[in-house]
Amino acid sequence: MPVFTASVEIHLKPGALDPQGQAVGDGLRSLGYAGVREVRVGKHVRVQLQAADAAAAVQVVERMCQELLANPVMETYRFTVTRDDER
């Protein structure tokens, strides 16, 4: 069965509080980066999985995102899936 790698980017929805982003922004400004206006911090998750084909891998990763990787109430996500022998 082929092996695929999913690269998942997860970000807070606009308007959701981002205390980690705020702390990073404050730190950057304290280091002299006065032009920094807003920082939003997200997550990057890489998953290797076996699936019958690319379509099946996409379906599995979509379910992973909905069930565990992202909180759909306050986060958005997007992902790419590549077959490992295509890398």
Image: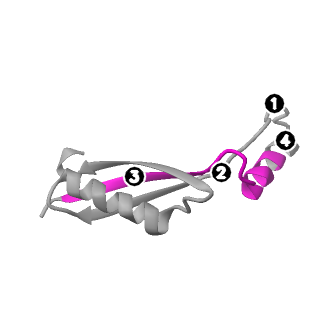
Q: Which residue is mark 1?
A: 35
First along the sequence among labels 3 and 1: 3
Tell me where the magenta segment starts and ends, as one range: 3-26
Question: 85 left or right of 26?
Answer: left
Q: Are marks 4 and 2 in contact (CB under 8 Å)?
A: no
Q: Which residue is mark 2?
A: 41
Q: Residue placed at 45% from the left, 68% from the top?
A: 67
Distance Cα–Cα, label 4 vs label 2 = 16 Å
How far across and down, in percent of the image, does residue 66 sit?
A: 45, 62
Distance Cα–Cα, label 4 vs label 3 = 31 Å
**Seen from this angle, which residue lies furthest top?**
35
Local packing at callout 1 (Cα closer than 10 Å; few below 14, some 14-19, many 20+) is few
In this figure, what is the number of numbered marks? 4
Give amino acid for label 3.
Answer: Ser
Disc 2 is placed on an element classified as loop
User: Along the line of sight, which residue is nearer the eye, 34 or 21?
Assistant: 21
Q: Are marks 1 and 4 in contact (CB under 8 Å)?
A: no
Q: Is residue 14 within the magenta segment?
A: yes
Give amino acid for label 2.
Answer: Val
**Seen from this angle, which residue lies furthest left?**
1
Q: Are marks 4 and 3 in contact (CB under 8 Å)?
A: no
First along the sequence among labels 2 and 1: 1
Give amino acid for label 4.
Answer: Arg
Q: Which residue is mark 4?
A: 29
Q: Are marks 3 and 2 in contact (CB under 8 Å)?
A: no
Question: 67 left or right of 32?
Answer: left
Distance Cα–Cα, label 3 vs label 1 = 31 Å
Give amino acid for label 1.
Answer: Gly
**Seen from this angle, which residue lies furthest bottom?**
68
Q: Which residue is mark 3?
A: 7
Disc 1 is placed on an element classified as loop
